[in-house]
Image (tube, coloured by chain):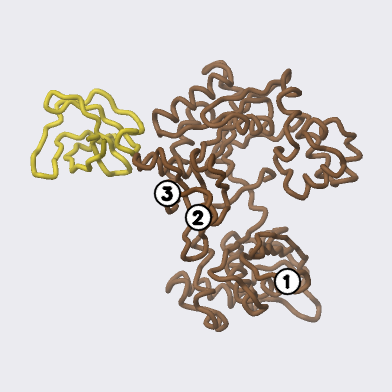
Chain colours: A yellow, B brown
Amino acid sequence: MGKTFVTITAEHDTNGMIKPTVLHWADGRKWEIEKIFDVRMAASLKAGGQGLRYTCRIANKQVYLYCDDGKWFVEK
Amino acid sequence: MNRTILHVDLNNFYASVECLYKPEIRDKPVIVCGDAESRHGIVLAKNQIAKQAGIKTGEVIWEAKQKCPGLVLVPADFRKYLRFSRMARQIYSNYTDQIESFGIDEAWLDVTGSTKLFGSGQEIADTIRQRFKSEIGLTASAGVSFNKIFAKLGSDMKKPDATTVITQDNYRDRVWSLPVGELLYVGRSTRQKLNNRGIYTIGDLANRDVHRLRLLLGVWGETLWTFANGLDVAPVRLNGEESIVKSVGNSTTTVRDLVSDSDVKLIIYVLAESVAARLRKYGLKCKTVAIHVRDKDLQSFDRQGKLQVPTYVSNDIAQKAMELFAANYRWDKAIRSLGVRGADLVMATSHVRIDLFDGDNMESETLEKTIDGLRRRFGHYSVQRCAMLLDRELTGFNPKDDHVIHPVSYFK
């Protein structure tokens, strides 16, 4: 298990909430974030890290996307 | 009224944060250490596995390596630790506004007023521990009691990741059997004094005649006696309540051992300048100067002396510090670290009695303020004492802006 840092496209709303919309893989592939189920602070024991955790549906799969002090990563 | 006070202690804080970020070292012995190059190479924290190998905080790195082959060394990253400390505080603030941090990884919470909302002290402690685990990935141990001292003792009893409750009914069984050295503010020399009088446990201390203790230890005797009997009434300070500054000090572990008066003088000048600059920043003057000296065998002592006139001029502070040092050190060992502190603070604007013959200190005060201005505009090293150039390696640090973490005292 490891972690992969990713580039994201996000919407910043007027309340300061950040909603990621597209996830950019390092090889140039893009994934649309279809739905966000849950947002909470959480530690990632699998990948090693901590931050705001977005539980997302991407390509019909549930994925944890973390924002750790401004750096975004997914568990691999 | 009975209070409900929690003391929460994050287990192996620095090491746990590092292990959280590096899953591959989680099941190896890990220590977090200072920078060995600049001789801050001691163990700052260790994880559970390293602890079992007998590694102690404050040990030198090579000692630790000898005890435990395969040891993983991680350099300290204080920015990260402060971020985690803030997150922990945010979790506490969901349960009470009375939070008093004690260092970076410990805090007291007074949840007396929140028990109707969130359940008993133990329930709140368990919830907080659970949230720590899931939200920030760290474990904590908690003590629940009716005063701060017992709450702290409780959090030390069971580690890691556990809650200990000490009540009015069970403190005699749970606390009194502990060795007296466990009590807050019983250090090496106080413990020795107490042991000499046949006081080995906290219970022994609690059952002594308070007047005898007063004769032995002065006011401290009485304070420790109230601690041991659970009579401590110190409140948990409110969130955000700034404590009034009682003293301003800086200390440093130097890049090499100090071996002569002139070495010491250089360091004292650097430290005194920082102390003086900080006093000026706060608008305070000090009436007492204290020094802290630690030799290369890590034995240390403190000495203090009064000044004639309150001051925030670095020359006066340095002079007094040198005087104290010369009167109290025999140079049987080289020195590893030095500290200078200004205490007994008064407002800089308050009236002072001017010496009839020596006049006032205006000239040097204006000079130092000008230096402050120059340094603010052109950087710390733009103006320096000539003596600093004697040994650039030794004096090339800026205690005023370099330091990150302030140690705190229970008696603020």
Q: CA distance from mark 2 to mark 3?
A: 25 Å
Q: Which mark is residue B332?
A: 1
Q: Earlier in the sequence, mark 2 or mark 1?
A: 1
Q: CA distance from mark 1 to mark 3?
A: 36 Å
Point 51% across, 67% down: residue: B398
Q: Nearer the viewer, residue B267 or B269?
A: B267
Report which residue position mark 2 lands on: B404
Q: Chain of mark 3?
A: B
Question: Image quarter for residue B195?
Answer: top right
Q: Chain of mark 1?
A: B
Point 61% across, 65% down: residue: B275
Q: Nearer the viewer, residue B183 or B311?
A: B183
Q: Which mark is residue B72?
A: 3
Point 51% across, 57% down: residue: B62
Circle nearer the viewer, 2 or 3: 3
User: Going by the image, does B136 lie left or right of B173?
Assistant: left
Figure quadrant of the N terminus of chain B: top right
Label 2 crowd (10 A; few <14 / some 14-19 / many >=20): few
